[in-house]
Image: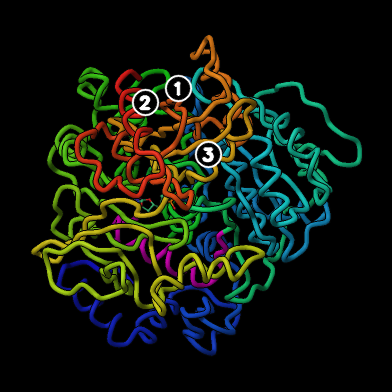
């Protein structure tokens, strides 16, 4: 399974295209199965019916825990670095993690959870979060992790969409200097969540919380009442492992569904090959488990591979902007995986935060979530990598389950700002808007994947047609990524960004329609249009044009109130960076907002706005341009 040279990569790639069935079968054999599969691949992209390792039986936690407990019980599985730098880090060996997962799995069963039930997890980055995720997988419950920064309403929408029976949370969370309520937010969400019968609360901040009789129980009490022995549930290869909600260009966030075997095989295969993890090394991914990166590359990929995964509770700027580098020095981190937005933000804090840190343990630096600009790539390479580390710019998506286009560390020749080459098993293609394939090199187009890979999205929870329509309809027989992409003269891929109405803010996906809905619910807001614009640190910022019923006397107060509404409805990550009050929006005669024009104005372009002759009221454009200049 492990590729060690560029030649081996080329051979593996060729085999994966010529003979995908045997290619993946050989890799899948290296895992532990309760019953082997009957057919490697079935179904088709046309109706989003892809199935992998059909008929196989397994449990992902036996692969992530039991087999390592047998071979190396005292090897560190998770190193947990708490928010407060003075507090001691905690190491959970595979044996200890296994025991805690089994114990908590029994708590789930005792509280009525059975195979196939949905469990919502709303927790900060503490070991109990990883334990809760794995315990769900142990008993065959489908976990739905909701990022701790989302609002009560966002939790309620997600819980209701998949009828979660339980929520696992904490009293509160530490994030830098802040203490954030968690249980209280869950309580607000639960006002509108009839399916939830049980709430399990782990203690973190010792914030007083209300505990409802018959519904709420404490984690610490429950684990005392059960045994530490919990045989793993027998799961089918295609049984859902988890749901993770993500934003698209229209409507509410979709519940992306990943299934057991294909996801396991692909997350572990890509972890091992992209990062080239060696026994004894410490791997640190800075993502939150609330996003797909945390699922695939903090929990499943590393643990299924028997690696040591460092999990950090806090933020990169607490107590100061040297925190990541301090963690790397103290834990002798070998592989570090973060987002361009973090790099760009830390670049700005000055040399004293990294110059005096010993970063010599580092071997591989990863980047994920958004295009990494050359300046950030070079800074990362020179100042953190000291020119001795390989940078893996990994392109993938919630829907792809694992890394798709990326260098293999120290194997693939890198190029700043390029995700370089597809991993074995991944067949990218560039197409134009009509669906014509764009051949050759030195070209640009829409990125599609023309052949199934094991961790491709299986469905969107509760609405299979939406999955077909969103990903498999635009280019029949192919998976559409919604990303634009260039292929340069060397055949290297560079992702240029979304081609749909999704904004990538600090590596987080935000749907413009969702933000508009939140804005429109604010009193006085008649209509709004949201676009992305280039932002030095965040990659993209959110720019909102708002028609308001009367111009406010105190515009800054109104702006603050509108931001409070967005925070209440979605969460602070969706707050617009700029709000411009306008008297009208550029619309065509048929009433369609011309976002292209709004995007250009938000980017600061006022000269060449293209054809505006189809606009109902061209004068509105001049007014918006003038207003934008004053902002
Ligand atoms: C979107 C997916 C994949 C985990 C984190 C984000 C953008 C992701 C890169 C990269 C350029 C990237 C794409 C993609 N993206 N990685 N290395 N270079 N763009 O997952 O929230 O599902 O977002 O993030 O636009 O479509 P996500």
Residue under circle 1? 85
Residue sitting at 49 percent across and 13 percent down? 556
Give the residue drawn at x 30%, y 34%. 601
Residue 163: quadrant of the picture: bottom right
Label 3 secondary element: helix
Which segment did they paint magenta? Answer: 256-280
Task: Please give the name of the residue rendered at 57% of the width and 37% of the height, measured from the top-left corner.
Answer: 126
Q: CA distance from mark 2 to mark 1?
A: 8 Å
**Mark 2 lies on residue:** 323
Task: Identify the secondary structure beneath mark 2.
Answer: helix
The reply to whether dot 2 and dot 3 touch (C-beta < 8 Å) is no
Is 106 drawn above or below residue 322 in the view shown? Answer: below
Q: Position of residue 467 (x, y in %)?
A: 54, 67
Would you name the residue on which mark 3 appears? 515
- Nearer the camera: disc 2 or disc 1: 2
SS under mark 1: loop
Point out the residue furthest to the bottom here. 38
Looking at marks 1 and 3 on the same chain, the residue that comes earlier in the sequence is marked by 1
The single residue placed furthest to the right in the displayed view is 213
Marks 2/1 in contact by CB < 8 Å: the verdict is: yes
- Across the whole image, how many numbered discs are drawn on residues? 3
Q: Residue 210, how many percent across, how many down?
A: 82, 27
Note whether 568 is above or below 30 in the view shown. above
Residue 31 location (% of width, % of height): 48, 73
Question: Which of the two marks, 1 or 3, is nearer to us in this view?
Answer: 3
Nearer the N terminus, badge 2 or badge 1?
A: 1
Instruction: Give 628 or 221, whichever is nearer the viewer.
Output: 628
Q: Quadrant of the C terminus?
A: top left
Any part of residue 243 in sight: yes
């Amino acid at each position: 399974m492990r590729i060690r040279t560029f030649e081996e990569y080329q051979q593996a790639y060729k085999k994966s295209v010529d003979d995908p069935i045997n290619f993946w079968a050989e890799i899948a054999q290296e895992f532990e199965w309760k019953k082997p599969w009957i057919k490697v691949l079935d179904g088709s992209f046309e109706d989003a019916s892809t199935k992998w390792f059909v008929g196989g039986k397994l449990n992902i936690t036996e692969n992530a825990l039991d087999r390592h407990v047998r071979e190396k019980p005292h090897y560190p599985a998770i190193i947990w670095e708490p928010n407060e730098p003075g507090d001691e880090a905690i190491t959970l060996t595979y044996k200890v993690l296994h025991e805690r997962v089994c114990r908590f799995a029994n708590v789930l069963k005792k509280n009525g959870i059975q195979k196939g039930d949905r469990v919502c997890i709303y927790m900060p980055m503490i070991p109990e979060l990883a334990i809760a995720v794995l315990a769900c997988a142990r008993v065959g419950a489908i976990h739905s992790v909701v990022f701790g920064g989302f609002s009560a309403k966002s939790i309620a929408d997600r819980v209701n969409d998949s009828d979660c029976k339980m929520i696992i949370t904490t009293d509160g969370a530490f994030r830098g200097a802040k203490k954030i309520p968690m249980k209280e937010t869950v309580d607000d969400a639960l006002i509108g969540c009839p399916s939830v019968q049980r709430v399990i609360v782990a203690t973190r901040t010792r914030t007083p919380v209300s505990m409802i009789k018959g519904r709420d129980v404490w984690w610490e009490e429950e684990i005392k009442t059960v045994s530490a022995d919990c045989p793993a549930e027998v799961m089918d290869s295609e049984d859902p492992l988890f749901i993770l909600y993500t934003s698209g260009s229209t409507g509410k966030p979709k519940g992306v569904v990943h299934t057991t075997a294909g996801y396991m095989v692909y997350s572990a295969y890509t972890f091992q090959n992209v990062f080239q993890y060696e026994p004894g090394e410490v791997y640190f991914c800075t993502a939150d488990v609330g996003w797909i990166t945390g699922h695939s590359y903090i929990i499943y990929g590393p643990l299924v591979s028997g690696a040591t995964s460092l999990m950090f509770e806090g933020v990169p700027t607490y107590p100061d902007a040297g925190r990541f580098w301090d963690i790397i020095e103290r834990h002798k981190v070998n592989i570090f995986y973060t987002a361009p937005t973090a790099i760009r933000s830390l670049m700005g804090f000055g040399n004293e935060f990294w110059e005096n840190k010993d970063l010599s343990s580092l071997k591989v630096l990863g980047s994920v979530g958004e295009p990494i600009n050359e300046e950030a790539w070079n800074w990362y390479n020179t100042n953190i990598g000291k020119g001795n580390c390989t940078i893996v710019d990994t392109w993938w998506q919630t829907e792809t389950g694992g890394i798709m286009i990326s260098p293999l560390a120290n194997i693939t020749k890198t190029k700043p700002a390029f995700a370089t080459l597809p991993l074995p098993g991944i067949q990218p293609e560039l197409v134009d808007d009509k669906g014509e394939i764009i051949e050759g090199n030195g070209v640009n187009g829409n990125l599609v994947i023309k052949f199934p890979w094991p961790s491709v999205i299986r469905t969107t929870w509760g609405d299979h047609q939406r999955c077909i329509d969103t990903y498999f309809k635009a280019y029949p027989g192919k998976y559409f990524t919604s990303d634009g992409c260039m292929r340069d003269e060397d055949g290297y891929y560079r992702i240029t960004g979304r081609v749909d109405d999704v904004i990538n803010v600090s590596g987080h996906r935000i749907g413009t329609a969702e933000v508009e809905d939140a804005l429109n619910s604010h009193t006085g807001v008649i209509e709004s249009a949201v676009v992305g614009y280039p932002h030095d640190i965040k990659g993209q910022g959110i720019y909102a044009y708002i028609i308001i019923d009367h111009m406010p006397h105190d515009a800054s107060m109104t702006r603050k109130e509108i931001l409070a509404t967005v925070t209440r409805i979605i969460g602070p990550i969706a707050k617009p960076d700029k709000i411009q009050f306008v008297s009208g929006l550029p619309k065509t005669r048929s009433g369609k907002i011309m976002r292209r024009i709004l995007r250009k104005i938000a980017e600061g372009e006022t000269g060449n706005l293209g054809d505006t002759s189809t606009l109902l009221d061209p004068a509105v454009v001049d007014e918006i341009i003038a207003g934008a200049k004053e902002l």
